[in-house]
């Protein structure tokens, strides 16, 4: 059995309004590691069922809109509206969806779900748990759902939707565009909604840093201070290279990643994983500030200029 499976069956929309909603009304079931996440207690019928009924268009739209942050943004309490980008309930639009959070480590994901009552829909979700999954598996299953919704819209002659445009941009992205989109995702932003100036800030900041530290930097940085923080981190790396530093002990890890002759897009991932292992950091451990990132890289406060910490902002309360 697939550790992550999304099943749907198109159903009568009854009184649903709007062409996208009527066309995609369905029965939805989600299973993770032999647990049915959509199992609910129906308060009206006083029965337990394994699925919920709702239009799938809003869910597919949420997946496409948050595609890059969903898979590359790591949990960070300083990031605004993190839950809206990572909790499936944010796609409910008044319908019943479980409290299912996708927590990325930048490569793979931990899925966490909890019991929750949806009083407006007269149901209570009964399942709770957590399970770690490979990122590729989650991507394939979510992409399959989006494509099914798009095919259904075409069958029902619902054309020119925002979802179709968003998904086309994702599927047509070439490798250089994907690199940019992954970095934007690590910042928690939609790469397709950025202004030209914001996009240039991301590109310029990425060009300042070695690929080996780039992912961790973008996972930690404050978007509003991105270029300044990249300049500061580059200065620290140059300073460390000019003198004996703990950073030197990690150089061998980078050499090993390069010697493995993997594609260049994966060399940085291998180095970051090895560095986290060397520093006894688990994949889900959060590097919450630029100062902490400097510590992981082995920079001492003594003799180096401190990095600016991101401004604190409240984490949106979860549903």
Image (spheres, helix red, strand yellow):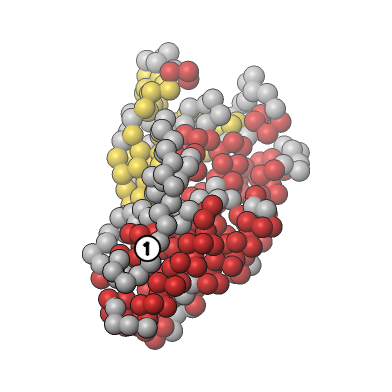
Residue 299 image position (x, y, % from top left): 31, 70
Q: Determine if residue 151 is in view.
A: no
How many residues crowd mark 1 within 10 Å: few (<14), some (14–19), many (20+)? some
Position of 270 relative to 8 (above/below): below
| Extreme residue toward the top, this view | 44
User: Dividing the picture into quarters, in which one does residue 213 lie?
Assistant: bottom left
Query: Residue at the bottom extreme?
Result: 259
Compared with 149, 199 (above or below) is: below
Q: Which residue is mark 1?
A: 306
Q: Is residue 26 at all visible to an observer of this figure?
A: yes
- Quarter of the image where the C terminus is located: top left
Image height check: is 253 above or below 28?
A: below
Along the viewing direction, whichever of 5 and 252 lies nearer the viewer = 252
Identify the residue at image location x=35%, y=50%: 110
Quarter of image, res 178 = bottom right
* Residue depicted at x 54% and y 62%: 227
Instruction: Name the element at disc 1.
Output: loop
Q: Nearer the viewer, residue 208 or 75?
A: 208
Left or right of 253? Residue 85 is: right
Work out whether residue 62 or residue 176 is closer to the camera in this orientation and state it.
Answer: 176
Query: How many badges with numbers are in the image?
Result: 1
- Residue 67: x %, y % from top left: 54, 51
Which residue is painted at 37% across and 63% down in the image? 306
Q: Is residue 185 left or right of residue 114?
A: right
Which of 183/123 is in front? 183
Q: Position of residue 32 (x, y in %)?
A: 37, 44
Residue 171 quadrant: bottom right
Q: Measured along the vertical axis of the image, is residue 313 above or below residue 165? A: above
Q: Where does the image place residue 11, in percent across and percent down from the top left?
A: 59, 29
* Residue at x 44% of width, y 63% of height: 217
């Amino acid at each position: 059995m697939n550790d992550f499976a999304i099943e749907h069956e198109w159903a009568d929309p009854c009184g649903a309004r709007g062409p996208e909603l009527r066309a995609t009304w369905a029965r939805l079931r989600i299973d993770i590691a032999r647990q049915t996440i959509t199992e609910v207690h129906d308060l009206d019928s006083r029965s337990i069922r394994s699925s919920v009924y709702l239009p799938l268009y809003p869910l597919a739209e949420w997946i496409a809109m948050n595609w890059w942050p969903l898979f590359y943004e790591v949990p960070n309490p300083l990031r605004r509206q993190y839950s809206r980008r990572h909790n499936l309930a944010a796609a409910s639009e008044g319908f019943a969806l479980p409290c299912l959070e996708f927590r990325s480590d930048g490569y793979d994901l931990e899925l966490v779900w909890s019991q929750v009552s949806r009083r407006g829909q007269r149901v209570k979700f009964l399942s709770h748990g957590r399970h770690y999954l490979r990122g590729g598996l989650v991507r394939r299953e979510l992409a399959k759902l989006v494509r099914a919704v798009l095919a259904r819209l075409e069958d029902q002659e619902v054309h020119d939707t925002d979802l179709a445009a968003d998904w086309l941009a994702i599927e047509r992205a070439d490798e250089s565009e994907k690199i940019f989109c992954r970095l934007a995702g690590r910042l928690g932003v939609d790469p397709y909604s950025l202004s030209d100036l914001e996009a240039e800030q991301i590109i310029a900041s990425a060009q300042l840093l070695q690929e080996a530290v780039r992912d961790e930097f973008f996972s930690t940085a404050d978007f509003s201070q991105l270029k300044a923080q990249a300049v500061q981190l580059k200065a620290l790396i140059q300073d460390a290279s000019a003198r004996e530093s703990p950073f030197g002990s990690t150089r061998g890890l980078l050499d090993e990643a390069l010697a493995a002759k993997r594609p260049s897009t994966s060399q940085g991932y291998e180095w970051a994983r090895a560095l986290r292992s060397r520093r006894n950091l688990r994949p889900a451990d959060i590097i919450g500030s630029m100062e902490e990132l400097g510590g992981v890289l082995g920079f001492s406060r003594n003799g180096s200029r401190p990095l600016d910490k991101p401004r604190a902002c409240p984490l949106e309360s979860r549903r």
